[in-house]
Amino acid sequence: QVQLVESGGGLVQAGGSLRLSCAASGRTFSSYAMGWFRQAPGKEREFVAAISWTGAGTSYADSVKDRFTISRDNAKNTQYLQMNSLKPEDTAVYYCAASRFDGVPKMYRSFAYWGRGTQVNVSS
């Protein structure tokens, strides 16, 4: 089992940057594909980005492509989401997730473990 804790959220002006971190417990972090999802008020949770267990494969939602970068450090049991050129529509709770999927998962149901989320607010 994996326990996930997100950090790095906060309030930023449009055009600014934030870096989210997700620290994972356990010694098998490197065997999990990892992902980020977000949920805005009144909306369903949506896929943001994912990375394979090796870090070689990544995938992004069209809405964040070229602005967000997902990465991981298996030695530190941590994954990251670098968010640049932030927009007010990026405002949401961001969730870290882990998956046993062998590849780059993008479906919600592919992820078995979830953090509690970190709030990101982007002001206009």
Image: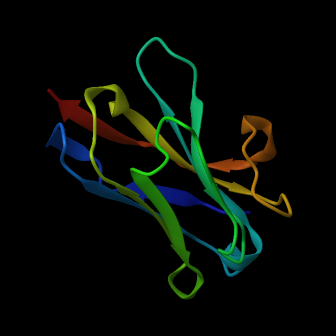
Q: Is residue 19 left or right of residue 6?
A: left
Q: Name the side, left or right, on which 101 lies relative to 2.
A: right
Camera sees residue 23: no
Looking at this view, is 28 or 11 the one in front?
A: 11
Give the tally of numbered discs: 0
Camera sees residue 107:
yes
Task: State left or right for residue 84 relative to residue 113.
Answer: left
Q: Nearer the viewer, residue 19 or 30?
A: 19
Q: Vertically, is 66 above or below 37?
A: below
Which residue occupies the extreme front position in the image? 66
Q: Nearer the viewer, residue 88 or 66?
A: 66
Look at 55% across and 58% down and name the residue there: 4
**Residue 121, position in %: x, y?**
24, 34
**Residue lying at 30% horizontally and 52% vertically, measured from the top left:** 84
Is 121 drawn above or below residue 110 in the view shown? Answer: above
Q: Residue furthest right?
A: 102
Q: For the view shown, which residue lies furthest in the bottom direction? A: 75
Question: In the picture, residue 94 is in which quadrant?
Answer: top left
Q: Quadrant of the N terminus?
A: bottom right
Drawn side of residue 17 relative to residue 74, left or right: left
Judge whether 94 appears above or below 29 on screen: above
Q: Height in image: 39 above or below 72?
A: above
Quarter that holds the C terminus: top left
At horizontal 70% and vertical 67% (from top left) the residue drawn is 57
The image position of residue 99, as x and y in percent, is: 75, 56
Residue displayed at 41% across by 35% down: 93
**Residue 6: which quarter of the image?**
bottom left
